[in-house]
């Protein structure tokens, strides 16, 4: 039981660190690629995506081949604009979804969406 408590505490600290990065302030990191933006916003904490360092999370779905899927979050038709909206405001689209609001700016959401759409 004590080991489980330590594991849960460690996971909470790790997720809190990912969620409380500079992304919460809405500051766009200077001159970053979409891959580094994903790292900045903590996407690798929950998602797998080939080519993004550390993206080995198992909480959310893999983002590999996302452009080939028909729907996002099971209900939102997959398009670059809808993907950007989902990245920016998942709780507005699907209240209670596991994906948290990460303070992603509109420009960063579009850059990340374009990167994901191009990743095949």
Image: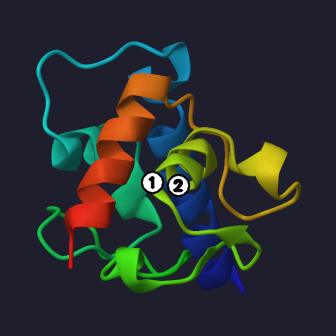
Q: Of 67 and 24, which appears nearest the observer?
A: 67
On the image, numbered disc 2 is attached to which residue? 83
Tell me the mark number nearer the camera, choosing from 2 and 1: 1
Badges 2 and 1: C-beta atoms under 8 Å apart? yes
Q: Secondary structure at mark 1?
A: helix
Question: What is the C-alpha distance between the residues marked 2 and 1?
Answer: 5 Å
User: Does residue 81 sit above or below 20 in this rendering?
Assistant: below
Residue of label 1: 80
Quadrant of residue 89 within the rendered picture:
top right
> In the depicted view, which residue is nearer to us: 12 or 46?
46
- What number is the disc on residue 37? none
> Looking at the picture, how far across and down is residue 61, in whole percent?
51, 80
Q: How many marks?
A: 2
Would residue 9 be seen by someone viewing this image from the given angle?
Answer: yes
| Quarter placement of the C terminus | bottom left
**Image point 39% across, 25% down: which residue?**
107
The secondary structure type at the circle numbered 2 is: helix
């Amino acid at each position: 039981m004590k080991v489980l408590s330590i594991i849960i505490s460690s996971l909470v600290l790790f997720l809190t660190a990912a969620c409380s990065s500079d992304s919460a302030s809405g500051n766009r990191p200077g001159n970053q690629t979409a891959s580094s933006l994903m790292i900045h916003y903590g996407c690798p904490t929950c998602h797998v995506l080939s080519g993004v360092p550390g993206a080995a999370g198992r909480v959310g779905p893999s983002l590999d081949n996302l452009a080939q899927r028909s729907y996002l979050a099971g209900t939102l038709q997959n398009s670059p604009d809808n993907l950007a909206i989902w990245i920016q405001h998942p709780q507005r689209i699907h209240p209670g979804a596991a994906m948290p609001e990460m303070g992603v700016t509109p420009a960063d959401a579009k850059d990340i969406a374009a990167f994901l759409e191009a990743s095949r």
